[in-house]
Image (cartoon, rainbow, N blue to C red):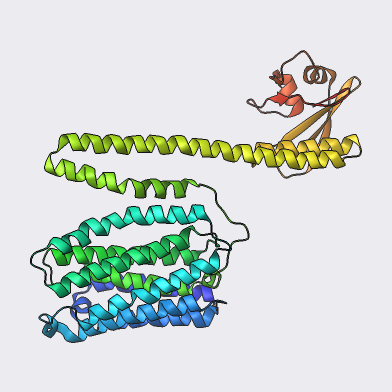
């Protein structure tokens, strides 16, 4: 089997197994399924390291150690069975699973440092914004209730707060890994999805425990196994060997996805304020929180427009600088025309077509760079040449239908006349 086939088969079998665990009562009522599923995931991570042979194995070895500790905790809970219902907190399973965060966070941090060719202050600030915004969710739903809950014993309180803090460390390391300057790969996407599933499962389990639930429930157990299997799928994917490789060029652009993450993380705090005010019928506080959230969205939209404008100006400056270099080295009109065409194509962006009209005598010759980047030319008649070469017209000319057809222009295209020298316009 090819490496890709191994990954696909593992993921398909894992999805079917998790679905069967939820649907078939004999599986989630027995003791063997949780141990077998965790061992399967651990074996998948180890097999991925052996099959794909990444250059930097240390992060994946750390991940394997973390999953092994999580699995040993499952083994302890499964073997204890009903007899472990009255065990004092923290149990051995709690200690093992709490200790599993250390190698997981270490692996994520090692991979992030290897991926980033240099530290970017912008990416670091973005990661801090997203992490701090998302940390409000476990802080409000788990940490604060654990501190103030009167019926919790000291051991349970310590373990709930400890796992929530471990989740926050894992979240911060994952966000930093996803936003650094390294290569984007399917293995990174699967790894990020696995961490999201793990954090969601831990949050739901902690909330259920605060509400008095004894067990995790079938769906939460299936989500936990999904976290294991997704991590193994990331290790088995062929792109896992590129997880620690930096990108050839660092991408510091403010993309729509990154801007959405930043805005969403920042809106979590006013979102909690809005929900709390509505729940307590504090309408003045609700109006203030809603207005602040709306104002923040408007400010972000305005700043995004300014950033896009600055990026377009920088792109124009780069194109004009490159064109200036070509024009300085041009030795004949043909090279001047080609330099102008390349500058126009770069300024127009992807898919832009540039045409240069060089007037000569009674007719004119048009040079163009088509959508495939090839240089083409044809002759235009005297009427079109006169329209394009009319010095009394404005800088941007709207041509009649016959002139557009002659120059192969679309309905919305316009012609810009530029002076390239005595007797030449384009």
Q: Residue at x 71, y 40 (%)?
A: 319
User: Which of the 4 quarters of the picture holds residue 106?
Assistant: bottom left
Pinpoint residue 118: horizontal percent, then vertical percent. 57, 61
Relative to 400, say whether 15 is above or below.
below
Pinpoint residue 262: horizontal percent, then vertical percent. 41, 48
User: Which of the 4 quarters of the picture holds residue 370?
Assistant: top right
Total marks drawn?
Answer: 0
Pinpoint residue 169: horizontal percent, then vertical percent. 35, 66
Pinpoint residue 178: horizontal percent, then vertical percent. 46, 60
User: Which of the 4 quarters of the picture holds residue 399?
Assistant: top right
Relative to 342, say whether 199 is above or below.
below
Left of 36 or right of it: where is 246?
A: right
Left of 147 or right of it: where is 32?
A: right
Q: Quadrant of the C terminus?
A: top right
Q: Residue at x 31, y 39 (%)?
A: 293
Q: In this orientation, which residue lies closer to the viewer: 164 or 148?
A: 148
Relative to 336, say whether 389 is above or below.
above
């Amino acid at each position: 089997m090819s490496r890709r086939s191994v990954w696909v088969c593992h993921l398909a079998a894992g999805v079917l197994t998790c679905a069967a665990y939820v649907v078939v009562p004999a599986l989630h009522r027995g003791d063997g399924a949780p141990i077998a599923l965790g061992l399967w995931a651990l074996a998948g991570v180890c097999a991925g390291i052996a099959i794909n042979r990444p250059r930097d194995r240390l992060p994946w070895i750390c991940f394997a150690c973390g999953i092994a500790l999580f699995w040993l905790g499952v083994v302890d809970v499964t073997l204890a069975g009903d007899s472990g219902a009255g065990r004092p907190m923290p149990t051995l399973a709690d200690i093992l699973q709490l200790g599993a965060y250390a190698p997981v966070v270490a692996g994520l941090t090692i991979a992030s440092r290897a991926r980033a060719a240099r530290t970017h202050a912008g990416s670091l600030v973005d990661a801090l914004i997203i992490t701090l915004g998302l940390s409000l969710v476990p802080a409000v739903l788990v940490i604060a209730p654990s501190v103030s809950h009167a019926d919790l014993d000291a051991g349970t309180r310590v373990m709930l707060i400890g796992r929530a803090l471990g989740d926050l460390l894992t979240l911060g390391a994952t966000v930093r890994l996803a936003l650094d300057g390294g290569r984007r790969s399917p293995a990174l996407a699967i790894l990020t999805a696995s961490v999201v599933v793990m954090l969601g499962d831990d949050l739901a389990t902690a909330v259920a425990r605060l509400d008095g639930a004894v067990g995790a429930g079938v769906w939460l157990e299936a989500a936990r196994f999904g976290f294991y299997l997704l991590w193994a799928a990331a290790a088995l994917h062929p792109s896992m060997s590129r997880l620690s490789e930096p990108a050839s060029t660092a991408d510091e652009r403010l993309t729509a996805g990154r801007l959405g993450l930043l805005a969403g993380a920042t809106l979590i705090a006013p979102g909690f304020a809005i929900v709390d005010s509505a729940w307590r019928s504090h309408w003045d506080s609700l109006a203030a929180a809603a207005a602040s959230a709306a104002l923040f969205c408007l400010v972000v939209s305005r700043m995004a427009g300014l950033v896009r404008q600055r990026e377009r100006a920088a792109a124009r400056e780069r194109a004009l600088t490159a064109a200036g270099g070509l024009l300085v080295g041009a030795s004949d009109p043909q090279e001047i025309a080609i330099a102008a065409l390349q500058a126009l194509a770069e300024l127009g962006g992807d898919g832009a077509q540039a045409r240069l009209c060089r007037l000569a005598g009674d007719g004119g010759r048009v040079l163009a760079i088509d959508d495939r980047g090839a240089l083409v030319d044809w002759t235009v008649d005297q009427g079109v040449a006169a329209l394009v070469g009319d010095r009394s017209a404005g800088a941007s000319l709207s041509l009649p239908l016959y002139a557009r057809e002659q120059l192969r222009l679309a309905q919305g295209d316009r012609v810009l006349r530029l002076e390239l020298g005595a007797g030449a316009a384009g």
